[in-house]
Amino acid sequence: MQETPMNVLFIVTDQHRAKDVGFMGNDVVATPHLDALAAEAMVFDNAWVSNPVCMPNRATMLTGRMPSAHGVVFNDRSLDWNVNTVARQFKAAGYATGLLGKSHLQHGMSRNAVLAYRGQGSSRSPFAEGWDTVEDGERYLRSRPEDPVDFYGFDHIELSIDHGACLSGHHLQWAVDQGGDPSILYIDQDTDTGGSDRSQNWRQIYRPPYPEAWHSTHYVTERTIDFIRSQSARKQPFFAWCSYPDPHHPMTPPGRFFDMYRPEDMPLPESRHDGLEGAPAHLRHFARIHPKDQRNWVAPCGFGSDALLREAIAATYGMISMIDEGVGRLMAALRDDGLLDHTLIVFTSDHGDMMGEHGLFLKGFMHYRGTLQVPLAIRCPGVAAGRTDALATTLDLAPTLLDLAGLKAFDGIQGHSLRETLASQSAIRDHVLIEDDLPMVTASLTPIPARTRTLVTPQYRYSVNSKGEEQVFDLIEDPEEMKPLSLTDGLAAELRGQLVQAMMMADDSSRGAPTTEQFALD
């Protein structure tokens, strides 16, 4: 490790489209602080997820392993308690490690995704009872439960578990300490509980029934700053995972942020009227579902109407602008405390959102750019700012953090360090592999294919699913993905071959392998 350890601030948002930030070309949403950060960073114009679902991709960012390798292939299972992570590497190196905000490494808030299985599971858990309940919202309703000493390598956690105007986890307790009523703050997302100015077009757009200072974005910003300053006072390097639950739906920007953007001023995507000819059948099925008719509040659907879509975009931009103000406060705190020049800062998101593109809304098994591409900016001390169109993926973030901090990687990491790209803007990979899995028991009850795999190259996006449905797009000539290419020529065969090779190389060979070192699980 370096003589003077470099601090790390990893900022991640939830369901944040690559194009919904100023430094990626959006001239409607106001993100001056993120744009200022990007101006001092390397901006990746071609960054993609490893999986377009929350839990699988978040576990990938923390482990540097594909979902099929770390095992969290869907939102219905928790990351194994004993898995190695970058947080554990930083902790072992003497860093204070803090997770502030949304974790979603466990399925506490996603238990509605779990369907009953017949018989016993394929294996039995070796972990003590209750290991996967840390993110269960009910644990925090009365008093603060005892936090684990080691939460996947984080020795300090302050969780904001849910979305929209539902306060859960440590966040709820914090608001209650300030006079909040838990019966109003901890709500059922499938009801019209609380709030005001609710959209007549879709119940998930409304103003929260509490002040701005109680919203998750403010909470995460406050707790991250406090964590950073506490470690600075102790002269201890920090690894801070600052995780904002927004701009994931429900779309509930609080206070002035709810009024920041007028729906009538919001531009709409031209591709919203895409007939989806030749697209997988489940996408056409989703497009016919009005948001009012969702199975539950997280289910994929169509965009409903132009009026609904304008309101959704305006509210989403309000949430993004609130995050931007939070990032501005984080940067100011680092600058004021003399830490900015000694801190590696990453800004990204766990996945995107269709937001009306191709007639689709939200996310889930929709392999278009809207859900697959994310914003990514890396500000590293001593590294010049710039932009690159070199391919990058969330799989690369874990090895990049370890490499730049001078720490050892661990067996099973499948991503590549972006150090070379940061230094010279050069490409380190010629493809990105994206996985998307649905448990077989769930796939048998829905039109969604059990497996989807996508290969992204510098020019093309090729997707195929377990029902045999395929699509190819030229991302350079057709960036809006409106003109699918022929599947009968040599190009499609070449891309199929590349995908097979990528999937073979993504196969996990590290589980159960003998090791020379053991990491402690307190």
Image: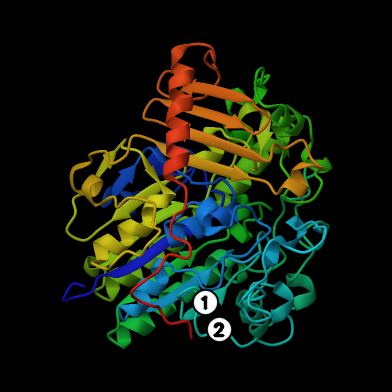
* SS under mark 1: loop
Q: Nearer the viewer, residue 364 or 93?
A: 93
Q: Percent x, y for residue 343?
A: 28, 67
Q: Residue at x 65, y 86 (%)?
A: 145
Q: Check the image and report above or below for 180 versus 507.
A: below
Q: Nearer the viewer, residue 180 or 67?
A: 67
Q: Is the residue marked by circle 1 packed among few (<14), some (14-19), or many (20+) residues within 10 Å? A: many
The amino acid marked with disc number 2 is Pro
Do the residues bearing badges 1 and 2 touch, measured as CB atoms within 8 Å? yes
Q: Nearer the viewer, residue 245 or 113?
A: 113
Quarter where residue 363 is shown:
top right
Q: In the image, 19: left or right of 291?
A: left
* SS under mark 2: loop
Q: Check the image and report above or below for 199 versus 277.
A: below
Q: Percent x, y for residue 2?
A: 18, 72
How many numbered circles are shown?
2
Residue beneath disc 2: 148
Evaluate whether residue 26 shows in this view: no
Q: Is the residue marked by circle 2 packed among few (<14), some (14-19), or many (20+) residues within 10 Å? A: some
Quarter where residue 404 is shown:
bottom left
